[in-house]
Image (cartoon, rainbow, N blue to C red):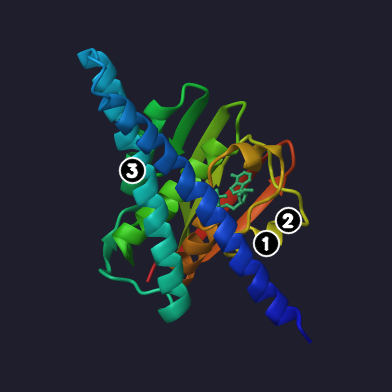
Amino acid sequence: DITHFRRAEEAKSTFISVVSHELKTPVAVIKGYASTLRREDADWDQSVIRDGLGVIEEETDRLTALIDNLLAASKLQAEGMRLNHVDSVGLADIVARSVERFAPQTQMHTLQIDFPADFPHIQGDPVRLRQVIDNLVGNAIKYSPDGGTVRIEGTFDADEVTVAIRDQGVGIPEDEQPHIFERFYRVDNTLSRQTQGTGLGLYLSQAVIRAHGGTITVESHPGQGSTFRIRLPRA
Ligand code: ADP
């Protein structure tokens, strides 16, 4: 049985192609702007310099996020998911802050939040839970290229809290749904070829939610959008 061996080989070559594509693109952009700006025969306007430095800064942030994800994924492989600081966490606040950050980045999407005022706090790692929410809200936007509403809803009962992130985007074919939480897995379609991504976000998110004793699930109909739902125990 060589399935296991073949899968490991596949993961390795996926890793190399993801890393080479996703790392090389921002590095090339940074290099291009830096060498243009420092040309000795040019006397750039302040505005050109400012814009160029702005792009360099953005691409550097992108690289940092990617490197963080790669390190987090390899650490997860090596030692499992560790929760650093477990504290009382208000998911409603985390969602509100995530929406505040994403809203200015898109004109095509309406971001709606619907949490009851008495939505309970839970015990958890606030930094990691924030990464999960950011990842799911970011994906909801990224995978609805024609815009629409992204609705984030909180509900709870005696035992658990639920956060559902619903978009009106491209959706995920049923046979792909079991795989999207795998490391480096991306649905292969025109959109994923045009969008940046490593296929690590949901893999890391699932590990975080499981480490909290919760679950993350998806419900989706291609062409009609997707709903990602996280459930976390209250106690
Ligand atoms: P990435 O976005 O970096 O590719 P993720 O692990 O976050 O990686 O997601 C894995 C794949 O699942 C994505 O490449 C995409 O094909 C699919 N996916 C995730 N979220 C959505 C969504 N809200 N709508 C449609 N497809 C999605």
Drawn side of residue 183 relative to residue 5, left or right: left
Residue 152 position, x and y percent, is 48, 42
Residue at horizontal 48 percent and vertical 71 percent from the top = 210
Residue 128 position, x and y percent, is 36, 60
Q: Secondary structure at mark 1?
A: helix
Relative to the observer, which residue lies in front, 205 or 152?
Answer: 205
Report which residue position mark 3 lands on. Answer: 61
Q: As shown in the figure, which amino acid type bears the numbered disc 3?
A: Asp
Q: In which quadrant of the rendered image does the N terminus lie?
A: bottom right
- At label 3, counting other C-alpha atoms closer than 10 Å, the crowd grade (few under 14, some 14-19, many 20 or more) is few
Residue at horizontal 32 percent and vertical 31 percent from the top = 35
Q: In which quadrant of the rendered image does the C terminus lie?
A: bottom left
Residue at horizontal 52 percent and vertical 58 percent from the top = 200
Q: Distance between the Cα atoms at labels 3 and 2?
A: 30 Å
Between discs 3 and 2, the one toward the N terminus: 3
Drawn side of residue 39 relative to residue 80, left or right: left
Q: Is residue 103 above or below residue 25?
A: above
Q: Secondary structure at mark 3?
A: helix
Instruction: Decide if ligand 1 comes within 8 Å of the CB at mark 1.
Output: no
Q: Secondary structure at mark 2?
A: loop
Q: Are marks 1 and 2 in contact (CB under 8 Å)?
A: yes
Instruction: Decide if ligand 1 comes within 8 Å of the CB at mark 2.
Output: yes
Residue at horizontal 62 percent and vertical 68 percent from the top = 11
Report which residue position mark 1 lands on. Answer: 179
Q: Quadrant of residue 50?
A: top left
Q: Is residue 220 above or below residue 128?
A: above
Q: Distance between the Cα atoms at labels 1 and 2?
A: 6 Å
Q: As shown in the figure, which amino acid type bears the numbered disc 2?
A: Glu
Tell me if residue 233 can be seen.
no
Residue 67 position, x and y percent, is 39, 56
Report which residue position mark 2 lands on. Answer: 176
Q: As shown in the figure, which amino acid type bears the numbered disc 1?
A: His
